[in-house]
Image: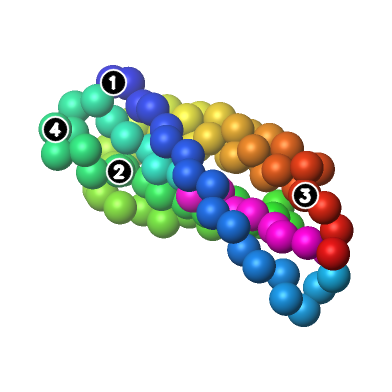
Amino acid sequence: MAFTYLLERRKQPLESMNQGDAYEVIFEIHHDDIVDGSPVLTGVVDWQDGVNFYYQQFMDPGEFSAIMACALEAVKAARMMIGERWCQSEPK
């Protein structure tokens, strides 16, 4: 059983705030045994450090810990991506 994650950063305009642009990162958790490539779990980490998870497929209760461990790594990586980009953006 091997779980991996994919990350995608998306820009969120902050029209009501004069702080430049913000970003959110979408992540997907995949299992090697799922041949069609469908994610087991997806989630969003937004610029305010909020995290939302969305279950995509039935999970074996025995796999829950491994999936959450992979999700934790994905969230850590997503926060670093947001932080790097946030520090590079210029305030308006």
In the image, which is nearer the foreground, mark 3 or mark 2?
A: 3
- Which of the two labelled residues, at mark 3 and mark 2, occupies the earlier sequence position? 2
What whole-number distance in Å separates the C-alpha atoms at marks 4 and 1?
Answer: 13 Å
Q: In this rendering, is residue 92 above or below 53? A: below
Q: Quadrant location of residue 6?
A: top left
Mark 4–mark 2 contact, CB under 8 Å? Answer: no
What residue does disc 3 label?
Answer: 89
**Residue 47 image point, x, y percent:** 69, 55
Q: Which mark is residue 39?
A: 2
Labels 3 and 1: the sequence-earlier one: 1
Q: Quadrant of the C terminus?
A: bottom right
Q: Is residue 51 visible?
A: no
- Disc 2 marks a residue whose amino acid type is Pro
Identify residue for label 1: 1
Q: Is residue 4 magenta?
A: no
Position of 7 with respect to 78 (left or right) is left
Q: Which residue is mark 4?
A: 35
Q: Which residue type carries mark 3? A: Ser
Provide the secondary structure element on which disc 1 rests. loop
Q: Is residue 69 left or right of residue 4?
A: right
- Label 3, label 4: how many angstroms apart (C-alpha)? 39 Å
Instruction: Tell which tag, 4 or 1, sits nearer the viewer.
Output: 4
x and y, in percent, of residue 33 in the image: 19, 27
Which mark's residue is nearer the viewer, 3 or 4? 3
